[in-house]
């Protein structure tokens, strides 16, 4: 796990990241405090990139990819941060040595397996007796329930769906042709070998579900967060543009811009704080309340409101049926939304706007200190509570400004700088 942040005003953007990385699976894992998460995207221009979540792209470390791209970029520049991001994606599309055809099929199979296992586990949890007493009749019932669950999942998932840019025009027919061998393997491994024989209709439902989720902008499956920040040639104020990226399938890069977390400093927006990954502590400072506690307050409000309504209904049930019906018809959801809106107004007035006004006036040094402090406070909470210490290690901090470029404030090295002067002598050589 990780914690990274970008703090921007008209002068500069300060970026900071911890060094913790978690290695292992769901049953056991280990945390190391040596990961690099901040990189210069160009050696000569004021632009950098941060990473969070997965540190690899289809098993290749992002550090390797970024540094190969940086060498390819050389002294070239682009008018905007978005143009840097677009060129970086084009670079990934053009390099098949970490997105080879075999690897693309392998990652699609893993992605499909993950989704199918999720659905099967949900069905098994609610129908344990059918799984524990397998027979031809019970297996048929399980497949029927599985089909219904896939329909529910697909309907819920496709509401307000938005597609990743590379997959907007990707047809189901193209996907079916590309993935035919994959689904033959999956049906054999997950179903046939275990005595289940899905119909062609169910197999098609499974393919359609995987296809829909593959195309969509979602952050529930494994992905990497890449945060491009700094100044393009034509930008006088810093910008921050995060993307979620996971894999390449059928030579299409599965990524999308996380628009809600982007920052665009302008004359109408003088300052912004952008936390990523484990941001509960940072959100507490920004909004004045712990996000979990706020969610608990809302849940309790809804519970007590419904309980109060039932209490009134019980009193009026026999004496005034008309009034009872009116009370029963009250829209509790709209009242809950009004409660949330009022709380948000208080947070905006007393916490968020005053803090943003202060951020807009901070010097470069203060921006860096604030960014480092917010990462450290996240670590400190993990350290002094029973929570897993998934944020930790040295905090790397950098400032990017239009005039001075990318300046490291704090940076760890895996080697002793005084013993490796040649590294610094060769840094700017092509």
Image (spheres, helix red, strand yellow):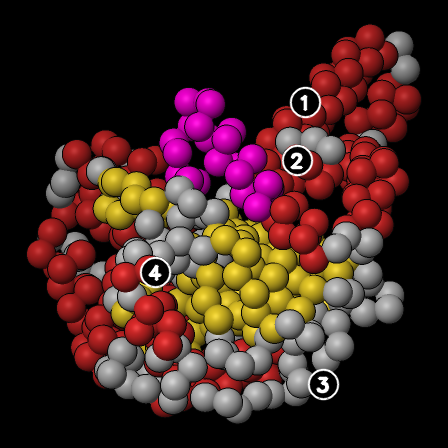
Q: Which mark is residue 316?
A: none
Q: Name the quadrant containing residue 377.
A: top right
The answer to which of 354 and 243 lies nearer the viewer is 354
Query: Badge 3: few (under 14), some or many (20 or more) residues near its Cα, within 10 Å?
Result: few
Which residue is found at the position 26% from the left and 67% from the top?
59
Which residue is found at the position 61% from the left and 73% from the top?
405
Which residue is found at the position 63% from the left and 46% from the top?
369
In the rendered view, tell whether residue 304 sits above or below residue 49.
Answer: above
The answer to which of 314 and 288 lies nearer the viewer is 288
Foreground mark, 2 or 1? 2
The answer to which of 420 and 84 lies nearer the viewer is 420
N-term mark: 4 or 1: 1
Q: Is disc 4 placed on a helix, strand or loop?
A: helix
In the rendered view, tell whether residue 180 sits above or below residue 121.
Answer: below
Residue 186 x/y as whole percent: 19, 64
N-term mark: 3 or 2: 3
- Is residue 57 in view from this perspective? no
Check the image and name the residue furthest to the left: 193
Q: Which residue is mark 4?
A: 417
N-term mark: 2 or 1: 2
Mark 2 and mark 1: span between their CA atoms?
A: 19 Å
- Is residue 376 in view from this perspective? yes
Foreground mark, 3 or 4? 4
Residue 145 x/y as whole percent: 34, 48
Q: Which residue is mark 1?
A: 300
In the rendered view, tell whether residue 311 sits above or below residue 305.
Answer: above
Mark 1 and mark 3: span between their CA atoms?
A: 50 Å
């Amino acid at each position: 796990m990780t914690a990274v942040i970008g703090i921007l005003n008209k002068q500069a953007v300060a970026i900071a990241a911890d060094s913790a990385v978690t290695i292992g699976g769901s049953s056991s894992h280990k945390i190391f405090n040596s990961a690099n998460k901040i990189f210069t995207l160009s050696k000569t221009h004021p632009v950098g990139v941060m990473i969070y979540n997965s540190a690899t792209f289809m098993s290749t470390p992002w550090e390797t990819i970024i540094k190969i791209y940086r060498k390819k970029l050389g002294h070239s520049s682009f008018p905007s941060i978005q143009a840097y991001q677009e060129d970086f994606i084009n670079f990934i599309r053009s390099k098949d040595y970490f997105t080879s055809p075999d690897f693309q099929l392998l990652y699609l199979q893993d992605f499909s397996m993950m989704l199918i296992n999720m659905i099967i586990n949900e069905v098994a949890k609610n129908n344990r007796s059918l799984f524990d007493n397998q027979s031809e009749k019970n297996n048929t019932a399980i497949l029927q329930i599985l089909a219904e669950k896939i329909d529910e999942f697909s309907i819920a998932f496709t509401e307000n769906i938005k597609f990743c840019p590379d997959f907007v025009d990707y047809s189901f027919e193209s996907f079916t042709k590309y993935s035919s061998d994959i689904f033959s393997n999956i049906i054999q491994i997950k179903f046939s070998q275990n005595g289940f024989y899905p119909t062609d209709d169910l197999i098609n439902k499974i393919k359609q579900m995987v296809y829909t989720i593959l195309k969509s902008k979602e952050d529930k499956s494994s992905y990497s967060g890449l945060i491009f920040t700094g100044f393009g040639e034509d930008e006088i104020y810093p910008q921050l543009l995060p993307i979620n990226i996971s894999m390449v399938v059928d030579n299409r890069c599965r990524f999308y811009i996380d628009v809600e977390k982007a920052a665009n400093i302008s004359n109408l927006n003088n300052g912004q704080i952008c936390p990523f990954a484990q941001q509960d502590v940072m959100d507490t400072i920004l909004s004045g309340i712990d996000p979990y506690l706020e969610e608990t307050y809302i849940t309790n409000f809804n519970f007590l409101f419904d309980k109060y309504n039932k209490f009134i209904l019980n009193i009026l049930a026999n004496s005034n049926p008309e009034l009872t019906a009116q009370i029963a018809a009250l829209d509790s959801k709209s009242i809950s939304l009004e409660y949330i809106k009022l709380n948000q107004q208080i947070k905006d007035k007393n916490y968020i706007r005053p803090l943003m006004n202060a951020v807009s006036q901070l010097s470069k040094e203060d921006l860096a200190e604030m960014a480092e402090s917010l990462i450290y406070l996240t670590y400190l909470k993990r350290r002094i509570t029973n929570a897993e210490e998934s944020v930790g290690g040295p905090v790397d901090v950098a400032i990017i400004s239009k005039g001075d470029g990318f300046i490291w404030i704090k940076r760890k090295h895996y080697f002793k700088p005084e013993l490796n002067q040649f590294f610094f002598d060769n840094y700017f050589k092509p």
